[in-house]
């Protein structure tokens, strides 16, 4: 797998923001049920949508054209569907974080932790896959 450092700065920043969000969500999951910082949950809830939208836009700008050029149209369509799924799951996580931040958690702490872990592990897996695809699309030196 290639390091994000070999790609343009804004792509690197996008990966760094996603990784930071994943780490922060993991910290919340680890803090459940008693150690939850309500303000931090509200802060994270506001970040999810923008981080996902930026990541998807960068993926579409840097990854999709190269995949299409190499006959990967079906893969691009699958990735577009995954973007929709990611954003829907992100909305569910955002809602639960807002509820936690307001002291009105909807789910049991174990369920919230499971939800958060499913979301951030999915994001990390998606980023690893993207880095592999981006590395494969780089011209050989």
Image (cartoon, rainbow, N blue to C red):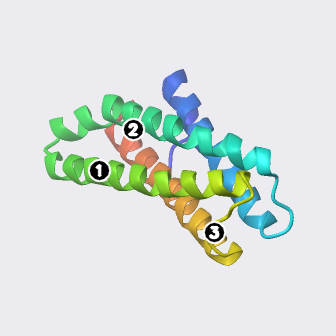
Residue lying furthest right: 35
Residue lying furthest top: 9
Whether residue 105 sits left or right of residue 93 in the image: it is right
Mark 3: give few (<14), some (14-19) or many (20+) Cα within 10 Å: many
Q: Position of residue 3 (x, y in %)?
A: 56, 40
Q: Which mark is residue 56?
A: 2
Whether residue 5 sits left or right of residue 57 in the image: it is right
Residue at the (61%, 75%) spot, across then down: 111
Q: Which mark is residue 95?
A: none
Q: CA distance from mark 2 to mark 3?
A: 25 Å
Q: Earlier in the sequence, mark 1 or mark 2?
A: 2
Residue at the (45%, 54%) spot, across then down: 126
Q: Position of residue 60 (x, y in %)?
A: 31, 34
Residue at the (15%, 46%) spot, across then down: 73
Q: Position of residue 89 (x, y in %)?
A: 45, 57
Mark 3 falls on what kind of element? helix
Report the front residue among 88 and 69: 88
Disc nearest the viewer among 2 and 3 = 3
Residue at the (16%, 35%) spot, across then down: 69
Query: What residue sits right under mark 3 in the picture?
Result: 112
Q: Earlier in the sequence, mark 1 or mark 3?
A: 1
Whether residue 64 sits left or right of residue 6 in the image: it is left
Report the front residue among 105 and 129: 105
Q: Earlier in the sequence, mark 2 or mark 3?
A: 2
Mark 1 falls on what kind of element? helix
| Disc 1 + disc 2, Cβ < 8 Å | no
Q: CA distance from mark 1 to mark 3?
A: 26 Å
The answer to which image quadrant residue 14 occupies is top right
Report the front residue among 136 and 81: 81
Query: What residue sits right under mark 1 in the picture?
Result: 79
């Amino acid at each position: 797998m290639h390091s994000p450092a070999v790609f343009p700065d804004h792509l690197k920043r996008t990966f760094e923001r996603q990784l930071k969000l994943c780490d922060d969500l993991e910290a919340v999951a680890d803090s459940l049920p008693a150690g939850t910082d309500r303000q931090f949950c509200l802060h994270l809830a506001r970040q999810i949508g923008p981080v996902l939208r930026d990541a998807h836009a960068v993926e579409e700008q840097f990854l999709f054209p190269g995949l299409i050029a190499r006959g990967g149209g079906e893969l691009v369509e699958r990735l577009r569907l995954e973007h929709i799924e990611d954003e829907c799951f992100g909305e569910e996580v955002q809602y639960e974080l807002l509820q936690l931040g307001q002291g009105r958690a909807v789910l049991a702490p174990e369920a919230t932790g499971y939800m958060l872990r499913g979301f951030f592990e999915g994001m990390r897996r998606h980023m690893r896959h993207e880095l592999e695809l981006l590395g494969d699309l780089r011209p050989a030196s």
